[in-house]
Image (cartoon, grey):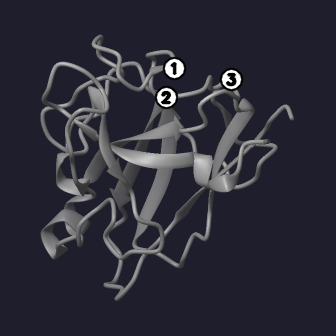
Amino acid sequence: MAIQPGDIVLNYSIKTGSAGNTTASNAASSLGKYVSTTEIASGVLYNLFPTLTGDQNSSGASDYKCVFVRNKHSTLTLIAPVVWLTGLTASSTTYSIGLDSNPASLVGASAAQAALIATTANAPAGVTFSAPTTKSAGIALGDLPPLSCIALWVKRKANDTGALASDSITLALDGDTRA
């Protein structure tokens, strides 16, 4: 059976532990190193970044979060996946994404699966950010083998603009499959 949409998920990252896919996490703790056991709920407010304060907005603060694209299929590779941003709202912030320099790995790998940052204000080393809004301009992740994951960083930058009640983006992903 071909890979189904539910086979490809986003998981938070976790700074602690000794291997991937062993520890639960949340948005606040999603600062790199390993894939957590916690999938990110789609369509939930503040599922990655918290509310931006007035001080953060006026200072032009940047925040970084690490998420993992995970292939839960047990036998099929996700071929040539690409990720891009959709659903951008009129915003007091801008968003961009970047691929971690670590290659795809089995979800339970013991070697670090992503860069690690101390706080959300620290940019991850070796990550180049862009803001693709179409599949053709998207970031190529490389083939994602079965039961594997790859780290993706999301950057939010405040633009010192007026307050908004809601601000959102969606990460879109498309790839191919055999069978």
> Residue 147: x, y in percent?
52, 28
Residue found at the very far top of the displayed protein: 111
The residues tagged by marks 2 and 3 sit, at their Cα atoms, a distance apart of 10 Å
Residue type for callout 2: Ile
Kindly identify the amino acid type of the residue bearing the numbered disc 3: Asp
Give the mark, 2 or 1, whose residue is nearer the N terminus.
Answer: 1
Image point (40%, 19%), residue name: 126
Residue 23, given in percent of the width and then of the height, sits at 20, 38
Of label 2 and label 3, which has the lower sequence position?
Answer: 3
Q: Please report contact status of discs 3 and 1: CB closer than 8 Å, yes or no.
A: yes
Name the residue rendered at 79%, 42% in the picture: 2
Residue drawn at the location 60% of the way across and 54% of the way down = 6
- Does dot 2 land on a helix, a strand or a loop? strand
Judging by the rendered image, the residue that carries numbered circle 3 is: 143
The extreme front residue here reads: 1
How packed mark 1 is, by other alpha carbons closer than 10 Å (few <14, some 14-19, many 20 or more), is many
Task: Determine the secondary structure under disc 3.
Answer: loop
